[in-house]
Structure formats: C-alpha cells, structure tokens
Image: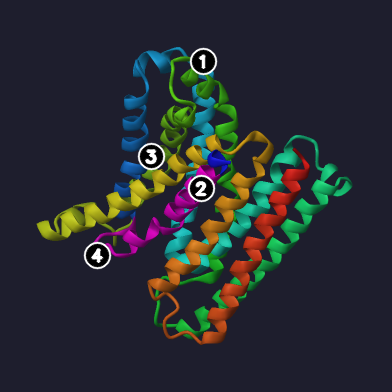
C-alpha cells in the first residue's frame, strides 16, 4: 500500500509540474516566444536528460553503444513526432492561455491517445464489444463534450476580449490542440519502443525507479531537433523577430528571462521524471491509475494556475463557471477511460 500511495503522490507532483511549467514563460519580458521556448527546451530536452543519465549510468557512452542503433533511431524519430506535438502544445498555450489551452489540448490528447493505439493494433472492435471498451468509448464521448464546453467558453471569451488580447485565437488554438493531440502520441510510442533500454539500464544496476530515464536522452533529443529547428528557422526567417535583439537586452533582463525560461524547462522535464517514479511504484495490475491521475491532475492544475494568473480577469463569471464545468467533464472522461483500462487488465 505504501508504494501505491507514493506512486499516486509522485504522479500528482509530475502532473502539477506539467500543468504549471508555462507560468514562468508568461512572465518573460522583451524576448520573443521563440527565444524563450528554445532556452527552456535547452534544459528540458537536452541538459537534464543527458545530465541525469550521466549520473545514473556507470558508462554513459558504452551503455548507448551497446544498444541497437536502429532502435535508437526509431525512438528518436518517435521523439521527433512528439516534438511536433510539443511545439504545438507551446503554441496552444500562447494562443489560448493555460486554463483554456490545457483543457482543450489534454481533452484532444485523451481522445486521440485512447483511440489510436487499439486501432493501430487491429483491436478497434474491442472498443464496442467488451465492457472495458464500452467504458473507454464512454470516456471518449464525455471528453468530446468536455472539449466542446471548454471551447465554447473560449469562443465567448474571445468575443469579449476582441481587440484587447492580440494573440488570443480560439480557432487557431483549436487547430494547434488537435495537432498536439495527434503528434504527442509519439511519446507513448517511443516509451513502448524503448523498453529494451529500460531493461538494459536495470541490467547495469540502475534502480528500477529510474530505469525509464536513460531512454529520454534519445526521445527528447528527437523532440529537441524539431522544436529548436522551428524556433531558429522563425528567428531567421521572420523579420519582426531577432535573436540578436533578444540577447542585447540589459543584463538584469537577460538574467531574469534566462532564469524564468530555465525554470520552465526544468519543470517540463520533471513531469516525466516524476511520472517515471509514479509508474514504477504502481503495481502492473493497477496501471490504469497512471493515466487517470496524470490527466486528471494535469487538467485541474492547469485551470487553477490559469485563473491564478488572471487569464479570465474581467470575463463574465458565467463563462468562468462554464470553463470549470468543461474541466470537470474532461477529468470525468479521464477516469472513465481509466476504468475501461482496468477492465482490460
């Protein structure tokens, strides 16, 4: 029981980190979004995965040299797929805000991430012919309702803010959220493909609690290529953006911005770090708890943080209540999907 309680606790911390990581980015001043995202990504996708693995592995280069290079390429490509979802997610936050953006992005991810794996495995029929499948489909339908409610709240927020919040755009944000939901599934594919790396880590006496972490070097490395390429191409190609101008700010501004971006990147990495801890503590027979907890706490914390940052200040209270109804519906959907997974054990 103690392990289960610890696993739940780590999942809560990881999901809270995931939901809150964008808050420091919103405080960055006089930098383009692309520069901020790249600096944050330097920590979350490169420095921390490599640094943690250097600490964990007795022979860093020898360990990866012992892994089939085709496998490393495969998980890096899945990581690149996740990277498209990652940059879409960041842009979703930029154009929708945290409370609305997380609700829609996670709702779409819940729907896509639930339906795609059984369809790809040729098991789509089980979604309609088994008790677990019916619970899962009920969760998908409830998630659709939740996304529709949150989107409607966002649409009305956009009408109220017209001319006051230049980057807020529900239509474009919805498109980005759908992209995020589709491509973010690359992380799930990558982790599944990386199981031999986890086994190899255990074989060299890495604690099972940390065995998933060495695979992040190549998964997040693939994501880093996509994200950094996007950021630097835009910094070069878009005339209104200038990396030189961003980096020529006064020293105090540079230090503050770098600290905020680094904090965001560290928080983004820690969601995966603590997710690994949580999953390692949850018995296999209760694996569905991982999905339920992460999605539920993620959406809940996103709503709380967004409201705390004043994203809905000045908006009619009825719309704020409608947002919370949608958030709670999406949380209910995550739990229905979790019940469906439990029946599938």
| Residue behind mark 3 | 45
| Residue behind mark 1 | 68
Kindly check if marks 2 and 3 are in contact, taking CB atoms under 8 A apart as contact. no
Could you tell me how far apart the alpha carbons at marks 2 and 4 are, in whole angstroms? 32 Å
Kindly check if marks 3 and 1 are in contact, taking CB atoms under 8 A apart as contact. no
Q: Is residue 245 visible?
A: no
| Residue behind mark 2 | 11
| Residue behind mark 4 | 29
Percent of width and height locating residue 260:
27, 56
Kindly check if marks 4 and 1 are in contact, taking CB atoms under 8 A apart as contact. no
Mark 4 or 1 closer to N-term? Answer: 4
Q: Is residue 20 magenta?
A: yes
Could you tell me how far apart the alpha carbons at marks 3 and 1 are, in whole angstroms? 22 Å
Mark 2 or 3 closer to N-term? Answer: 2
Q: Quadrant of residue 25?
A: bottom left
Kindly check if marks 2 and 1 are in contact, taking CB atoms under 8 A apart as contact. no
Q: State whether the magenta stretch is mostly helix, strand or loop.
A: helix
Please, which residue is most extreme toward the right here?
129
Number of numbered tags placed on the structure image? 4
At 41% from the left and 70% from the top, the residue drawn is: 167
Please, which residue is most extreme toward the left here?
251
Q: Residues within 10 Å of mark 3 (few under 14, many from 20)?
A: many
* 183 up-or-down from 144: above or below: above
Which element carries disc 4, helix, strand or loop? loop
At 21% from the left and 57% from the top, the residue drawn is: 246
* 59 up-or-down from 184: above or below: above
Which element carries disc 3, helix, strand or loop? helix
Q: Residues within 10 Å of mark 2 (few under 14, many from 20)?
A: many
Q: Viewer-proximal residue, 74 or 313?
A: 313
The residues colored magenta run 5-33
């Amino acid at each position: 029981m103690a392990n289960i309680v610890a696993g739940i606790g780590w999942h809560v911390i990881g999901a809270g980190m995931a939901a809150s990581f964008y808050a420091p980015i919103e405080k960055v001043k006089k930098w383009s979004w692309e520069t901020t995202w790249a600096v944050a990504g330097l920590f979350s996708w490169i420095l921390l995965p490599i640094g943690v693995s250097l600490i964990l592995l007795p022979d860093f280069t020898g360990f990866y040299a012992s892994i089939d290079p085709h496998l490393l390429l495969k998980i890096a490509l899945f990581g690149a797929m996740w990277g498209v979802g990652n940059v879409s997610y960041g842009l979703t936050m930029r154009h929708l805000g945290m409370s609305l953006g997380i609700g829609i992005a996670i709702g779409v991810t819940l729907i896509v991430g639930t339906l795609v794996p059984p369809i790809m495995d040729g098991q789509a029929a089980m979604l309609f012919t088994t008790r677990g499948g019916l619970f899962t489909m009920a969760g998908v339908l409830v998630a659709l309702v939740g996304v529709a409610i949150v989107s409607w709240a966002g649409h009305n927020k956009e009408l109220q803010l017209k001319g006051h919040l230049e980057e807020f755009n529900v239509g474009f944000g919805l498109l980005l959220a759908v992209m995020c939901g589709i491509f973010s599934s690359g992380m799930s594919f990558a982790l599944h493909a990386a199981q031999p790396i986890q086994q190899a880590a255990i074989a060299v006496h890495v604690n099972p609690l940390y065995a998933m972490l060495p695979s992040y070097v190549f998964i997040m490395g693939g994501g880093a290529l996509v994200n950094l390429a996007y950021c630097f191409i835009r910094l070069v190609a878009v005339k209104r953006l200038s990396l030189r101008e961003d980096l020529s700010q006064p020293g105090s501004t540079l230090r503050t911005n770098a600290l905020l971006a680094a904090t965001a990147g560290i928080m983004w990495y820690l969601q995966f770090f603590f997710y690994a801890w949580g999953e390692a503590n949850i018995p296999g027979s209760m694996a569905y708890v991982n999905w339920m907890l992460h999605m539920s706490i993620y959406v809940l914390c996103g709503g709380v943080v967004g409201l705390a940052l004043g994203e809905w200040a000045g908006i009619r209270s009825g719309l704020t209540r409608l947002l919370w109804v949608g958030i709670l519906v999406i949380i209910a959907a995550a739990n229905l999907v979790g019940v469906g997974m439990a029946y599938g054990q």
